[in-house]
Amino acid sequence: MMPFSTGLMAEFIRYRSALAVYCANILLFGLLLFASWRYSRWAGLVREDGPEGVARSIECRIVIA
């Protein structure tokens, strides 16, 4: 998906629809990353003995990005 939307953006730089496809693609991958991180925490795949606040920090970084 990323090479397609990046190529579309490079080829049709003046069209807003190309920008919309590119931004939607980045948003989709960000949502998938956030969902997979939440699921991995819920399923117990992340160690709980790590430093305090790391899980929350990762979530904040995903949301900001």
Image (cartoon, rainbow, N blue to C red):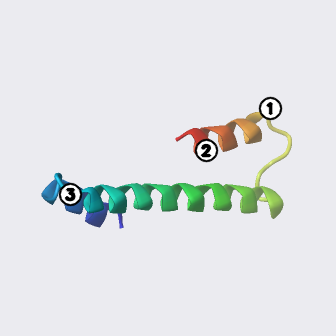
Which of disc 1 and disc 2 is earlier in sequence? 1
Please give the residue where the numbered disc 1 appears in the rendered image.
Answer: 51
Whole-Å distance between the Cαs marked 2 and 1?
20 Å
Q: Position of residue 20 (x, y in %)?
A: 35, 59
Element carrying mark 1: loop
Residue in the image at 73% along x and 57% along y: 38
Q: Quadrant of the N terminus?
A: bottom left
Tell me the number on the disc at residue 15: 3
Q: Residue furthest front?
A: 16
Nearer to us of marks 3 and 1 is: 3
Query: Position of 27 compared to 17: left or right?
Result: right
Q: Residue at x 82, y 60 (%)?
A: 42
Looking at the picture, how far across and down is residue 22, in whole percent?
34, 58
Q: Regarding mark 3 in the picture, which secondary structure is present there? A: loop
Going by the numbered disc 3, the residue's amino acid type is Tyr
Q: Is residue 48 left or right of residue 39?
A: right
Q: CA distance from mark 2 to mark 3?
A: 27 Å
**Mark with earlier residue (2, 3):** 3
First in sequence, mark 3 or 1: give its number.
Answer: 3
Residue sitting nearer the eye, 19 or 44: 19
What amino acid is found at the position of numbered circle 1 in the picture?
Pro
What residue is pinned by disc 2? 63
The reply to whether callout 3 and callout 1 are in contact (CB within 8 Å) is: no
- Residue shown at 80% from the left, 48% from the top: 47
Mark 1 is surrounded, within 10 Å at the Cα level, by few (under 14), some (14 to 19) or many (20 or more) other residues, namely few
Identified at 66% across, 61% down, the residue is 35
Q: Is residue 30 visible?
A: yes
Circle 2 or circle 3, nearest the eye: 3
Q: Residue 20 — which label?
A: none
Q: Identity of the amino acid at label 2? A: Val
- Under circle 2, the secondary element is helix
Q: How many marks?
A: 3
